[in-house]
Image: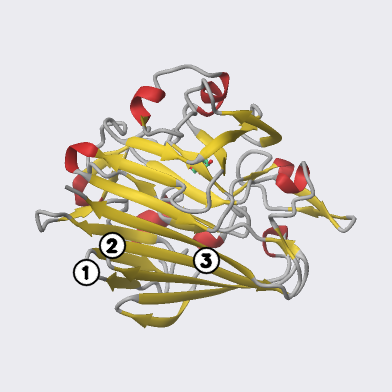
Amino acid sequence: MINNAQVFVLESKKLRVSITNYGAHILRVEMLNRNGKWSDCVLGYETLEDYKKYDGYVGATIGRACNRIKDGRFTLHGKNYQLGLNDGDKSLHGGIHGFDKRMFVASIYDEGMLQLQYRSVDGEEGYPGTVDVIITYRTFDDTLSVTYDAVSNKDTLVNLTNHSYFNLSDTSNQLKNHTLQIQAHEFAEIDENLITTGNFIPVADTLFDFRKPQEIYQQLQKNHPQKERAKGIDHHYNFSTSTNQVVLDYPPLKRRLIVSTSMPGAQIYTANFLDKRWFRNNKEFGFRDAICIETQAISNSINFSEGLEVILRAFEPYHEWTNYRFESYE
Ligand code: GAL
């Protein structure tokens, strides 16, 4: 049983969002269409128990450090740290009991704002330092804004994201007719274990090129050794602009998601490992039926560069935000 899990609803003119303090999951995002109807934009389960039971991090907040860290190991100021291993010999999305499995405390809640707090103690999942995290969700007009604040009492790694699966068609059709635009000239190479190597590959002349809007499904019919490794797109893109970095569009229903973030990039993941399962409203979704836009600093950088983007210095503020704008257009 999940104790003390609550559901909080945020509402604005054009959005209805449900969030739980269990793993600070986004449970539901509904947008108002021009025809006056509300439609679901993210995958979500029917019950909180399902969130605990299933893998895939559906809607979860990910921390302390998102995505894979090679061998779950890193060195900081000459000291070696071993993280919890939960993906073979890798640490994925914060380790065995990442933030997605932790109970947050709601400190502020009204119709348009929810603040969830969590204290991650020194040594949790192997990470140094006690980190206080505050995630703030706000809805205004057609935008859901997620702000991440954290402070640590020792130098540590912090790289937070949200793992919502978007699908603007509400059908499990492998993202057919969804177009994607990403303001990025390069993406991060991954090795056979899906770990970033520190090399970057220009998107030009590859299926990974979304500088102009491209149909995701069509792009995924093309070949590239990096696509074969991940069974699809499961790669970090380095952004080349500072706003509106990712746009997901579904022209048949004239719905569009525009993502703006303070973060330097995003893991774009086309749900290649999502096995078929039941989601809310008796809908089955699986392989490539949705897309995650995980705004983040590049994972594993602590092991191939100085990791400057992911090191949080003691008593210095971590402050990042991502805005998701859901537009119903003419
Ligand atoms: C993504 C990751 C994928 C997969 C997924 C969770 O962020 O890049 O490889 O692990 O999370 O199922």
Please give the residue where the numbered disc 1 appears in the rendered image: 13
Question: Quick one: SS at disc 1?
Answer: loop
- Relative image position of residue 2 (x, y in whole percent): 42, 67
Q: Is residue 2 visible?
A: yes
What distance separates the C-alpha of mark 2 from that of mark 3?
Answer: 29 Å
- Left or right, residue 186 beside residue 25: right
Of the numbered discs in the image, which one, if any, rests on residue 102? 3
Question: Quick one: SS at disc 2?
Answer: loop
Amino acid under disc 3: Arg
- Relative image position of residue 199 (x, y in whole percent): 70, 32
Label 3 or label 1, whichever lies nearer to me, is 1
Residue situated in front as seen by the camera: 7 or 166: 166
Residue depicted at x 54% and y 58%: 262
The mark that comes first in sequence, 2 or 1, is 1
Please give the residue where the numbered disc 2 appears in the rendered image: 142
Amino acid under disc 1: Lys
Residue depicted at x 41% and y 38%: 181
What distance separates the C-alpha of mark 3 from that of mark 1?
Answer: 31 Å
Residue depicted at x 52% and y 75%: 117
Residue depicted at x 32% and y 76%: 112
What distance separates the C-alpha of mark 2 from that of mark 1?
Answer: 7 Å
Of the numbered discs in the image, which one, if any, rests on residue 214? none
- Left or right, residue 304 beside residue 85: right
Q: Are marks 3 and 1 in contact (CB under 8 Å)?
A: no
Label 2 near ligand 1 (CB < 8 Å): no
Amino acid under disc 2: Asp
Q: For the N terminus, which image quadrant?
A: bottom left
Label 1 near ligand 1 (CB < 8 Å): no
Q: Is residue 120 visible?
A: no
- Relative image position of residue 269 (x, y in whole percent): 47, 39
Q: Are marks 2 and 1 in contact (CB under 8 Å)?
A: yes
Crowding at label 3, few (<14), some or many (≥20) Cα neighbours within 10 Å?
some
